[in-house]
Amino acid sequence: MRRYDWILILAAFLLFSLGLAAIASVELSRGGHFAFVEKQLVALGIGLALGVFAARANFQLFRSYARIAYFGGIILLLGLFLFGSTLNGTTGWYIIGGFAFQPVEVMKLGLILELARYFADDARRPFGSREFLGSGIRLAVPLFLVLLQPDFGSAILLLGIWAITAFFAGLELRHAAVLAAIVALGFLIGWFGLFQDYQKDRIRNFLYPASDPLVSGYNVLQAEVAIGAGGFIGRGLGGGSQSQLRFLPESQSDFIFAVIAEELGFLGILLIFTGYALLLSRMLKLAYQSRDYFASSLVIGIFALFFMQIVIHIGANLAVMPATGIPLPLVSYGGTSLLLSLALLGTVESVAART
């Protein structure tokens, strides 16, 4: 335990505490029953168990099960077309009783493990067209299944995991140009054939939020008002008008950053940024220090997922990126997201203890 990265653990604890306080504040406007807080604490207990198990296990064990996790995620995504439930226009959930499970979270873990295994197996070869195609195919299958749901936000995350991991593996400029062309083509195909109307509205809203302030631009404009109203020290927990009067939709998840900005102000946001800066910098340092190529690629994949989620969520709240419903890791309400985050942090600690 002395070899665990305790700075990373303390940063994760800080972020979760801020998120839980904001979720509790949101629930004050809904009668103060704190159902979200209770569910988040249950998810925390299960997630800690998963994280401790991952931290105590040798990370080489994950290499052995990388393909199982990858193909298991694909099978779960395929099962959605038969047994999946539709929420907010996306057929991406299994709902059993009162429990909702999003299998794309498993796919994120599976893709991270499989890419780390693939790049580690080819560590002695320079990154070339073979590696570009081989890793790209491993991305393309789950990416296509996620776009069919359609879940544009999760598709961006999968693409980001691949792009950042491939970059650290030696992605060349010509490959990046091919990737940009593929993304542009995929966007055109999605716009005319896959995206739902509400997803197109989010993109239009990102470009022209004031053109429809009461419908498609409402969420982003209310988030901007909340962030601007917080000032330096905020209005205090439970004192934010945007969240307490329920102007902010899905304030416990999609717009939790705006809630914290309004109620805790610049100081609260500084704590959020400090927590994430510590989290991400410790991952990069560990990836650099590790002499095992699989361990380095694994930590970089985890870094990529956290980094992409942070950028997309905060960018959407600040109206500099389209709103895609991506949670803020360790902060937003959501059991599946919290479980995955804690399991991944446990995996990072497994590498730290053995590096």
Image (tube, rainbow, N blue to C red):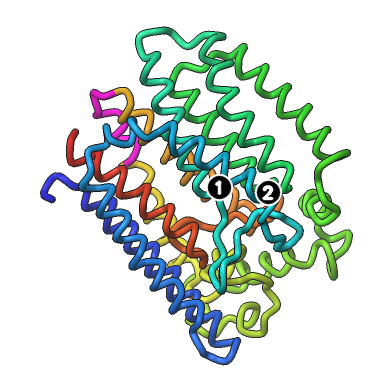
Question: In the drawing, does residue 58 fall left or right of residue 324?
Answer: left
Identify the residue at the far bottom of this view. Answer: 31
Question: In the drawing, does residue 157 fall left or right of residue 13?
Answer: right
Three-letter amino acid code at the position of disc 2: Met
- Identify which residue is drawn at 49% across, 74% down: 22
Vertical side of 237 occupied by 203: above or below: above
Residue 54 seen: yes
Q: Magenta stretch?
A: 283-292
Q: Which residue is mark 1?
A: 311
Q: Which residue is mark 2?
A: 321
Three-letter amino acid code at the position of disc 1: Val
- Identify which residue is drawn at 43% across, 67% down: 267
Identify the residue at the far front of this view. Answer: 82
Q: Position of residue 69 (x, y in %)?
A: 44, 39
Q: Secondary structure at mark 2?
A: loop
- Identify which residue is drawn at 46% across, 42% down: 109
Between discs 2 and 1, the one toward the N terminus: 1
